[in-house]
Image (cartoon, rainbow, N blue to C red):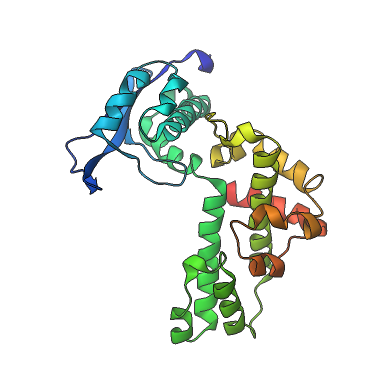
């Protein structure tokens, strides 16, 4: 049975690659050597936001004894840096390998697995936000003169009122296509779900007490219960979004942006369908 197949992971610093200096200390990239079914591979360790993990030899020395335990002892979280990211990484590697093996059986291969892992471990909201900004760039480049387009700071477009209002004024005579409006509202809806439901009402799911999790990742959406939970809450407890959800997203998005594209209860099914299409 797939659950009986052992996945072994060994972490190490790659000192062959030149480290990065910060505040007088040298940080080296962290790698994981994975063994499964008698085969092995090594991958660079990154968090769910695609940020590669770098650790000093001093900090790695503090956590290395804990890394050799299987499963990793949670006590090492208080030692060194990056502990929770490593725990999350190990958890998703083991879950993802067993899922890939369930799909491919004895044809399992590390090249296919590592390619899928890059996508499966991504943070859902960060992925949606990145894609949304690309859509808004394309829309703006098609409808604005070059000098006006270049005046927009797209990195702050949906997070600061000043930048969003400027963009609104520049594109005032252009209508967004309906599909893009739905994409925006679906993204806001997921963020509201993530913050309101998973942080406030189920804090353990998002690590507020230091618990490793795959919640909030593409893997969780595709293979666990996150899609069903999102659909249930969006059409039930979380709505009406029109009046109740603003505070749950206000730390992340421009209030003017949220006001302009406030999700509607009547469109909840469309938002669920949009995310299903994105991650299918």
Query: What x and y, as percent, mark residue 110?
Result: 37, 31
**For residue 1, above or below residue 187:** above
**For residue 198, above or below residue 64:** below
Query: What x and y, as percent, mark residue 174?
Result: 63, 82
**For residue 222, above or below residue 184:** above
Identified at 53% across, 25% down, the residue is 102
Identified at 30% across, 31% down, the residue is 59
Is residue 197 shown to the viewer in this render? Answer: yes
Quadrant of residue 8 within the rendered picture: top left
Quadrant of residue 77 within the rendered picture: top left
Query: What x and y, as percent, mark residue 72?
Result: 43, 20
Task: Count the labels in the image.
Answer: 0
Query: What x and y, as percent, mark residue 271?
Result: 71, 54
Viewer-nearest residue: 64 or 181: 64
Is residue 13 shown to the viewer in this render? Answer: no
Viewer-nearest residue: 242 or 184: 242
Viewer-nearest residue: 80 or 241: 80
Identified at 52% across, 79% down, the residue is 142
Identified at 63% across, 56% down, the residue is 187
Quadrant of residue 200 within the rendered picture: top right
């Amino acid at each position: 049975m797939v659950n009986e197949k052992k996945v072994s992971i060994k972490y190490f610093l790659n000192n062959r690659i030149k480290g990065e200096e910060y505040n007088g200390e040298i940080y080296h990239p962290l790698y994981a050597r994975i063994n499964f079914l008698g085969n092995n591979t090594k991958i660079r360790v990154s968090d769910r936001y695609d940020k590669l993990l770098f650790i000093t030899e001093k900090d790695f020395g503090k956590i290395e004894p804990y890394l050799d335990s299987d499963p990793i002892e949670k006590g090492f979280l208080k030692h060194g840096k990056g502990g929770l990211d490593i725990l999350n990484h190990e958890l998703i590697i083991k879950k993802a390998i067993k899922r890939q093996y369930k799909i491919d059986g004895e044809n399992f291969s590390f090249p296919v697995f590592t390619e899928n892992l890059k996508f499966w471990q991504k943070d859902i909201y960060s992925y949606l936000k990145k894609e949304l900004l690309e859509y808004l760039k394309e829309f703006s480049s098609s409808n604005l003169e070059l000098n006006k387009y270049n005046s927009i700071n797209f990195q702050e477009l949906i997070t600061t009122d000043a930048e969003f209002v400027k963009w609104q004024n520049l594109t005032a005579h252009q209508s967004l296509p309906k599909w893009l409006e739905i994409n925006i509202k679906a993204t806001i809806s997921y963020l509201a779900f993530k913050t309101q439901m998973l942080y406030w009402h189920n804090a353990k799911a998002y690590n507020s007490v230091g618990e490793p999790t795959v919640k909030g990742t593409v893997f969780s959406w595709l293979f666990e219960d996150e899609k069903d939970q999102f659909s249930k809450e969006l059409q039930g407890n979380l709505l009406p979004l029109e009046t109740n959800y603003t505070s749950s997203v206000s730390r992340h998005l421009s209030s003017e942006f949220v006001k302009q594209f406030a999700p509607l209860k009547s469109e909840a099914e469309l938002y669920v369908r949009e995310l299903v299409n994105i991650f299918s």
